[in-house]
């Protein structure tokens, strides 16, 4: 892992420097303004400093070593420029305890980088419980004062990835046919839209036979919504009016590869209505259940939702409306609470495109970084 500092006159120039040097995969760890020194500090706005990191390719053997004199000359120039920047940096951050060592690794007291990372997590809405859990785990692993920035960041990164676990998506391997998959979650979270996205992907991209069932007969528009999708895709849809019709509806799709069951959005705060959801689940006995949570949900409400759906032994998580939020701390918080498996993010209203399998590698960078 490379960690570098970039200083520029303004933010866009600093970002450009990061991208030019580390490429698009760079993680922005921290952005801050730093005062200029000397007379310039009176007439010019402060400089912008970005701390960015990039994971290096593990396979050193692949690197091509060129002993071209021109390359050597260029390298020397870059090196001397780096040294100069380093000196300027040290000058303008005299009050700062950070130092840059010869090989461009930043040596700072652990507490400093540790504070930066924790602050980034807070800004990304990772809650205090989750931060505490992660820090306790890191302490067990020997996080200490003498570790350098790279080590600390890597430790955080690994622990976040461990907490997020390896996501899983719907697979149609094995002999069981059809695979029965159910979608549950609060009102308006995106159950019907997400089901349509998944159905379309299996039909169009994998040429699978998909059957749809909806138990949502409460809202007048609900059945129409799913029927519209089913007509466009050419997938049959069955409407059931009571939980005890569920098994019959499933058995009609015996020759399908996949059966997707949509459920009505019912408030978990209304016991009578919510009991119906439980009954639908008990009757369906699905192979896979997805609990959908909108990425913009307040953590307090989210905890109530998780409690209410705790009646299910096992479920996978889909976070919807990821496009509508800036911070994804909720994902890590929910994983810290439930330890279930992640599956998809939905990222917009377009069927079937706006859905993706969660990439924990990218997500962990986002959660620890400071991107805007
Ligand atoms: N921005 C955004 N909007 C979404 C996303 N997924 C769904 N929506 C929108 O959210 C609204 C509700 O979506 P539905 O699929 O009807 O939600 P639902 O959970 O089935 O709703 P109920 O059946 O009433 O509980 C619609 O306007 C969708 O287009 C998403 O990933 N991003
Ligand atoms: Mg719906």
Image (spheres, grey):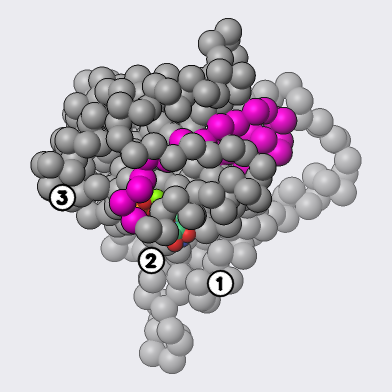
- Residue 104, compared with residue 89, is above or below; it is above
Identify the residue at image location x=56%, y=64%: 15
Residue 130 part of the magenta segment: no
Residue interval drawn in magenta: 198-219
Residue at 48%, 55% in the rendered image: 224
- In the image: residue 355, left or right of residue 44: right
Which numbered mark, 1 or 3, is in the foreground of this view? 3
**255 or 169: nearer the eye?**
255
Q: Which mark is residue 32?
A: 2
- Residue 107 rendering spot, x and y as whole percentages: 39, 42
**132 lies left or right of 371:** left
The span from disc 2 to disc 3 (Cα, nearest Å) is 31 Å
Say which residue appears at 41% left-offset and 53% top-offset.
222
Q: Position of residue 279 (x, y in %)?
A: 24, 29
| Nearer-the-camera pick, 120 or 126 | 126
Give the residue displayed 60% in from the left and 31% down from the top.
Answer: 210
Identify the residue position indicated by label 1 in the image. 12
The CB of the residue at mark 3 lies under 8 Å from ligand 1: no
Task: Characterize the local packing of mark 1: few (<14), some (14-19) or many (20 or more) Cα atoms within 10 angstroms.
Answer: few
Circle 3 crowding by C-alpha within 10 Å: few under 14, some 14–19, many from 20? few
Q: Position of residue 44 (x, y in %)?
A: 45, 87
Q: Which residue is farthest top?
A: 175
Check disc 2: other Cα within 10 Å, few if <14, some if 14-19, many if 20+. Answer: few
Residue labelled with disc 3: 300
For marks 2 and 1 on the same chain, the one whose residue lies earlier in the sequence: 1
- Does the rendering let one see residue 277? yes
Q: Is residue 100 visible?
A: no
On screen, 60 above or below 19?
Answer: above
Disc 2/disc 1 C-alpha distance (Å): 13 Å
């Amino acid at each position: 892992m490379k960690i570098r500092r970039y200083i520029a006159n303004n933010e866009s120039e600093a970002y450009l420097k990061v991208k030019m040097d580390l490429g698009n995969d760079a993680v922005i760890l921290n952005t801050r303004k730093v005062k200029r020194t000397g007379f310039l500090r009176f007439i010019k706005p402060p400089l912008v400093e970005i701390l960015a990191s990039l994971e290096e390719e593990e396979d050193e053997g692949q690197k091509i070593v060129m002993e071209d004199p021109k390359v050597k000359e260029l390298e020397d120039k870059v090196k001397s420029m780096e040294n100069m920047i380093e000196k300027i940096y040290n000058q303008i951050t005299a009050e700062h305890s950070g130092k840059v060592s010869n090989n461009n690794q930043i040596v700072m007291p652990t507490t400093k980088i540790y504070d930066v990372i924790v602050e980034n997590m807070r800004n990304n809405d990772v809650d205090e419980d989750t931060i505490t859990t992660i820090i306790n785990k890191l302490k067990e692993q020997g996080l200490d004062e003498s570790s350098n920035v790279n080590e600390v960041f890597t430790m955080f990164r690994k622990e976040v990835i461990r907490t997020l676990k390896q996501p899983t998506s719907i697979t149609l391997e094995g002999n069981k046919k059809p695979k029965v998959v159910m979608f549950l979650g609060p009102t308006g979270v995106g159950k019907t839209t997400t089901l349509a996205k998944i159905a379309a992907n299996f039909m169009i991209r994998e040429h699978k036979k998909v059957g749809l069932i909806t138990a949502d007969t409460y809202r007048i528009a609900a059945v129409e919504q799913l029927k519209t999708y089913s007509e466009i895709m050419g997938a049959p849809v069955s409407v059931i009016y009571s939980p005890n019709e569920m098994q019959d509806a499933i058995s009609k799709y015996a020759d399908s590869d996949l059966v997707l069951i949509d459920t009505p959005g019912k408030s978990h705060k209304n016991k009578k209505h919510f009991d119906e959801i439980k009954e639908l689940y008990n009757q369906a006995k699905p192979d896979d259940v997805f609990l959908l949570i909108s990425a913009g949900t307040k953590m307090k409400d989210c905890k109530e939702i998780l409690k209410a759906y705790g009646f299910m032994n096992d479920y996978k998580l889909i976070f919807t409306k990821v496009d509508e939020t800036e911070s994804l701390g909720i994902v890590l918080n929910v994983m810290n609470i439930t330890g279930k498996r992640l599956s998809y993010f939905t990222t917009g209203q377009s069927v079937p495109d706006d859905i993706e399998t969660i990439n924990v590698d990218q997500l962990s960078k986002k959660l620890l970084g400071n991107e805007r």
